[in-house]
Image (cartoon, rainbow, N blue to C red):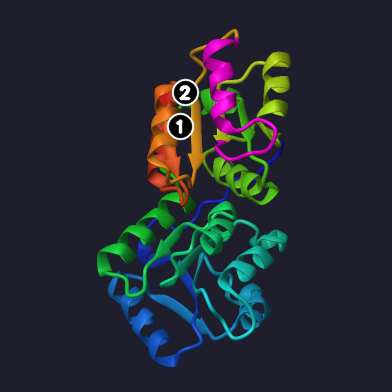
C-alpha cells in the first residue's frame, strides 16, 4: 500500500483554519479565541455548501464547524468532505452543545479530532489545537525508519470512512504496511494466514466485535502477546473494564488524541 507522507504544520500558529459558523457574532467570538490560542490564519464561511465551494481555494489544515448549518449538519459536512479525495483526511473539529450519542457517533466514526462544548474554554480549544498539530505532524524523528518500514498492522473496523482516516494518519507516521479487515471474523482469517506486529481494532462491529477478536488473540492465537490497540467511543464502564481485563494493550477514545496514538503505537511495537 503506497501512502505519501506529507509534513503538516509543526506549531499551532502555522495552522490554516476554515471556520464554518452561520452566526456573525459566534463567528467573531470563535475566530478571536483561535487567534488568542495562536492561530493566525482563519477564514470564515457560513454554510456547508460555502465550505465545499471554498475548501480547494483555502486548503485548510483544520475545519472548525458548528453542528447546525443553514443547509446541512456538521456531520453531513464532514461525511461530504470525506468523499473528496483531496480532503478525505482533513482535520475536523465540531463546536456544539449537542450531547445526543445518536448525533455524535457518526462524527466519531468519521474521524472528528475534537468535540468542543458550547461554550468552550480556552483550555478546551488549546488541547484540541495541540492534538490537531500532533496528528498532522507526529514526532517520529527518533523512530527507527527500517523498523517502521517493516511494521505490519492489521486494521479492523466495519466503517470504510474510519479505516481510511486511520490509514492516512498511520501513513504520516511512516506506517504504510496496513491490511484492512471489515470485522473481527475477517480479522481472524488474516491472522491465521499471515504475521502482524500490531492489531488496531474498533470495538463495535458486526459478526464479531473487537472484544471477541481480543479474546481470540489472547486465548487461541499462536501469538497471545500480539499488541492490540482498541479504538472506541464506548462509554459503558462495565464494557470498558471487560476489555481491559481481557488483556487489551491500549484503549483509545474517539476522538483520538494524536500524541497519545503516536506514543502508544511507538511503545507497543518497540520504536
Task: Work out which residue is located at the far front of the displayed protein and give it.
Answer: 238
For the point 59% across and 86% down, the residue is 70
Front in this rendered view, residue 208 or 69: 208
Q: CA distance from mark 2 to mark 1?
A: 6 Å
Q: Is residue 127 above or below residue 265?
A: below
Relative image position of residue 51 (x, y in whole percent): 61, 78
Provide the residue designation for mark 2. 269
Q: Using residue 67 as the reference point, say whether residue 130 is left or right of it.
A: left
Say whether residue 209 is magenta. yes
Residue 140 appears in the figure: no
Relative image position of residue 156 (x, y in whole percent): 63, 34
Quarter of the image where one finds residue 58: bottom right
Q: Using residue 80 as the reference point, say whether residue 103 is left or right of it.
A: left
Front in this rendered view, residue 145 or 193: 193
Q: Which of the labelled discs sits on residue 265, or is there none? A: 1
Relative image position of residue 126 (x, y in whole percent): 31, 63
Q: Which of the labelled discs sits on residue 156, or is there none? A: none
* Number of numbered labels in the structure image: 2
Q: Dots 2 and 1: beta carbons under 8 Å? A: yes
For the point 70% across and 26% down, the residue is 185
Residue 158 appears in the figure: yes
Q: Which secondary structure lies at badge 1?
A: helix
Q: Which residues are magenta?
A: 202-221
Crowd rating for badge 2 (residues with CA inside 10 Å; few <14, some 14–19, many 20+): some
Amino acid at each position: 500500500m503506497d501512502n505519501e507522507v506529507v509534513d503538516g504544520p509543526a506549531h499551532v500558529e502555522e495552522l490554516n483554519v476554515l471556520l464554518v459558523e452561520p452566526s456573525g457574532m459566534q463567528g467573531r467570538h470563535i475566530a478571536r479565541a483561535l487567534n488568542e490560542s495562536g492561530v493566525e490564519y482563519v477564514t470564515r464561511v457560513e454554510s456547508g455548501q460555502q465550505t465545499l465551494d471554498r475548501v480547494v481555494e483555502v486548503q485548510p489544515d483544520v475545519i472548525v464547524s458548528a453542528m447546525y448549518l443553514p443547509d446541512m449538519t456538521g456531520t453531513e459536512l464532514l461525511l461530504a468532505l470525506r468523499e473528496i479525495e483531496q480532503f478525505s483526511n482533513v482535520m475536523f473539529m465540531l463546536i456544539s452543545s449537542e450531547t445526543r450519542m445518536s448525533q455524535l457517533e457518526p462524527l466519531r466514526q468519521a474521524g472528528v479530532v475534537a468535540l468542543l462544548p458550547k461554550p468552550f474554554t480556552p483550555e478546551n480549544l488549546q488541547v484540541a489545537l495541540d492534538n490537531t498539530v500532533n496528528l498532522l505532524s507526529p514526532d517520529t524523528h527518533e523512530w527507527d525508519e527500517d523498523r517502521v518500514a517493516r511494521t505490519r498492522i492489521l486494521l479492523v473496523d466495519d466503517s470504510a470512512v474510519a479505516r481510511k482516516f486511520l490509514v492516512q494518519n498511520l501513513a504520516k507516521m511512516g506506517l504504510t504496511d496496513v491490511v484492512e479487515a471489515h470485522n473481527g471474523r475477517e480479522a481472524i482469517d488474516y491472522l491465521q494466514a499471515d504475521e502482524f506486529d500490531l492489531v488496531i481494532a474498533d470495538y463495535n462491529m458486526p459478526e464479531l466485535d473487537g472484544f471477541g477478536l481480543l479474546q481470540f488473540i489472547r486465548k487461541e492465537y499462536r501469538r497471545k502477546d500480539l499488541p492490540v490497540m482498541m479504538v472506541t467511543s464506548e462509554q459503558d464502564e462495565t464494557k470498558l473494564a471487560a476489555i481491559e481485563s481481557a488483556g487489551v494493550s491500549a484503549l483509545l477514545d474517539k476522538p483520538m488524541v494524536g500524541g497519545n496514538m503516536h506514543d502508544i503505537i511507538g511503545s507497543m511495537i518497540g520504536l
